[in-house]
Amino acid sequence: MKKLIIEGNKILKGEIKVSGAKNSVVALIPASILTSGKCIIKNVPNISDVQNLIEMMEYLGSEIKYIDDTIYIDNKNVRNETIGENFSKKMRASYYYMGSLLGKYGEAKISFPGGCVIGERPIDYHISGFEKLGSKVFIENGDTYSISAEKLVGADIIFKKASVGATLNIMFAAVKAEGTTNIINAAMEPEIKNVADFLISMGAKIDGAGTNKITIEGVQELGDGEITVLPDRIEAGTFAIMASLLGDKLTIKDVNKDHINALLKKLKESGVKVKSSKNDLIISKCDNLKSVNVKTDVYPAFPTDLGQPMSTFLTQCEGISIFEETIYENRMRHIKYLNEMGANIKLKDRIATIKGKTPLKGKEVEATDLRAGAAMLVAGMIADGITTITNIEHILRGYENIVEKLSKVGASIKLVDE
């Protein structure tokens, strides 16, 4: 069992670099299946989700080389295979093979996806979108999606609510479909455009990625592709939160500030001074933080993936803050651990009323999911004494070399394997 052990209240100074976006690369790798050619993906974070996806690609016959931060993919021998639960249960993003295999071969079989337990997370938008493109979808043996189409034909697909996963999966299925597909009320996250740019480099015809309407004109074949993974806005935001509590002119490098604008607005509203220089942020701790209210929603609103770390930040603000999670119903499981550490949080459904400022004390806590783990990481960094975080495999799924990065700027943190 791996654990993180943190001695809190260490000032952070120096430079910390943001890695490539986890939420982008987990879609870029499955997207490469759509071509039988070669692909290059640069600025790839070395996280467990990437390793799992490489294993899936090799299982499908792809030849992979992962050198430094670049993945080289050769799909000349790729074949269509069932993605079993030995792969799918490891991560939510395994479901992207639904769209990519369907788009390439006209059929896909994949066991139910796994990932963090943060709510229902249904994939009905994905399924209905595949059906509108001409697919038939069945559930085999109670645990495997079987999707097939004699021919994929473009259609207008309207989402009741924007969904990143569904937007990408329908994009994958539509790039080789006959005719034109319009995705209406599409997700607008930056990762969508990053993936679309990768497909366009292969020869796909996609317009409007990054807006709420994406138009895809089907093509018969795709060729070689190349892309650089954009900076991870969630990692950048997590570091910005830490710097606001512990920074001494901590420089966060390789940040796209526009992608974390909602977070920066809230930090500034609470009293944090944020300086920027090109693609860097320079942040120092603020000793007199004011309470602010935070409500998560789809991009460009405050991101759900930063909600949990932000709730830790709110425990250090004077007054009462309201934190509301609107995306996933089980994203409040970290609250009990914050309270055990000394926070004063009352929880009702998806709304947390946080009374601050409260000093936190080191405890043994659990990372119940990836971003809850980030919340515990922030809590341990600001707590008095020693904090031990268990179940850290969640954290390692999304934050590259987190121990090395934080240690380099002054944190007292170590990973132990018992």
Image (tube, rainbow, N blue to C red):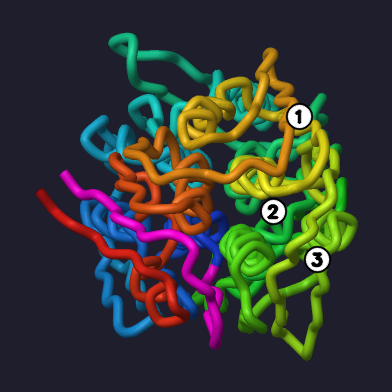
- For the question of whether residue 233 can be seen, the reply is no
Q: Earlier in the sequence, mark 2 or mark 1?
A: 2
**For discs 2 and 3, the disc positioned in front in the rendered view:** 3
- C-beta proximity under 8 Å, tags 2 and 3: no
Amino acid type of the residue that numbered disc 1 sits on in the rendered structure: Glu
The x and y percentages for residue 120 are 55, 19
Residue bearing the label numbered 3: 272
In what element is the residue under mark 1?
A: strand
Query: Residue at 63% of width from left, 83% of height from top?
Result: 251
- The vertical placement of 276 against 181, above or below, is below
Quadrant of image for the N terminus: top left
Q: Is residue 96 magenta?
A: no
Residue bearing the label numbered 1: 324
Label 1: few (<14), some (14–19) or many (≥20) C-alpha neighbours in 10 Å: many
Based on the displayed image, in which of its 4 quarters is residue 146 positioned? top left
Residue bearing the label numbered 2: 218
Q: Earlier in the sequence, mark 2 or mark 3?
A: 2
**For discs 2 and 1, the disc positioned in front in the rendered view:** 1
The x and y percentages for residue 30 are 44, 54
Side (left or right) of 348 relative to 50: right
Q: Earlier in the sequence, mark 3 or mark 1?
A: 3
Amino acid type of the residue that numbered disc 3 sits on in the rendered structure: Val
Query: Between marks 2 and 1, how big is the CA–CA gap?
Result: 40 Å
The x and y percentages for residue 10 are 47, 69
Query: Between marks 2 and 3, how big is the CA–CA gap?
Result: 48 Å
What is the magenta range? Answer: 1-20
